[in-house]
Amino acid sequence: NAGVTQTPKFQVLKTGQSMTLQCAQDMNHEYMSWYRQDPGMGLRLIHYSVGAGITDQGEVPNGYNVSRSTTEDFPLRLLSAAPSQTSVYFCASSYSFTRVTSGANVLTFGAGSRLTVL
Amino acid sequence: RKEVEQDPGPFNVPEGATVAFNCTYSNSASQSFFWYRQDCRKEPKLLMSVYSSGNEDGRFTAQLNRASQYISLLIRDSKLSDSATYLCVVILPQTGANNLFFGTGTRLTVIP
């Protein structure tokens, strides 16, 4: 059981380059999300999805795109990388977004992707 | 106003000490509460859920105070391995928008 798999673990980009962070989960989770974590800022939600074909913006969506064509995959695209996007990115999933039952909202995180934009 | 606020610390405590963290939330309709643990350069992992009646897991006790709108985490007999950042999570009623909010985390260092 792989859980949530993120790739790549590390990436260095030049300003203006584009790239995609991959996220896949094998737990049949309905809810998937992307966070960035910066020192002193905590986890900030970028985009999230409550099911295949449905995505929505979080707190800091500018400069990022997402899609959810399957239940398993939720890639995050950086359109034109900027130094301000240097961060650690976490993908997370949970069984349900809408059902507030024991365990349904518990998030499982990927191991993180460390991105540096020069 | 932030949905969830935590004292960032750091809390530096000796081994064997008891330490407590609080996390305040702004929305009285908040429904679910959790504590996550994040080790340095690792992903957050669920430590424990917080139930209305309070709950205990070994050396860890979580409590919810709805009247004052905060949750707490108590760690007894601190171990070196407890050194980590502790994140609180609050889930609001479903409204169609994002309803899950993290605190910024409280850093704990247990000193030999």
Image (cartoon, coloured by chain):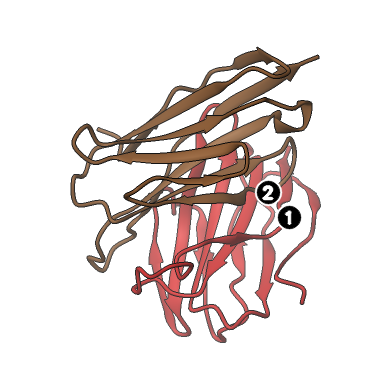
- Image-based side of B99 in relation to B7, left or right: left
Element on which disc 1 rests: loop
Q: Tell me the residue at 75%/39% (across/down).
A: B41
Q: Tell me the residue at 45%/72% (across/down).
A: A49
Residue B85 at x, y percent in the picture: 62, 32
Q: Is residue A85 visible?
A: no
Mark 2 and mark 1 in contact? Answer it, CB < 8 Å.
yes
Which colour represents chain A?
red
Residue A24 at x, y percent in the picture: 67, 74
Q: Quadrant of residue A61?
A: bottom left
Q: Quadrant of residue A74?
A: bottom right
Q: Is residue A46 visible?
A: yes
Q: Amino acid at mark 2?
A: Glu
Residue B84 at x, y percent in the picture: 67, 32
Mark 1 — on which chain does it sit? A
- Image-based side of B3 in relation to A77, left or right: left
Element on which disc 2 rests: loop
Circle 2 residue = B43
- Chain coloured brown in the rendered structure: B
Circle 1 residue = A111
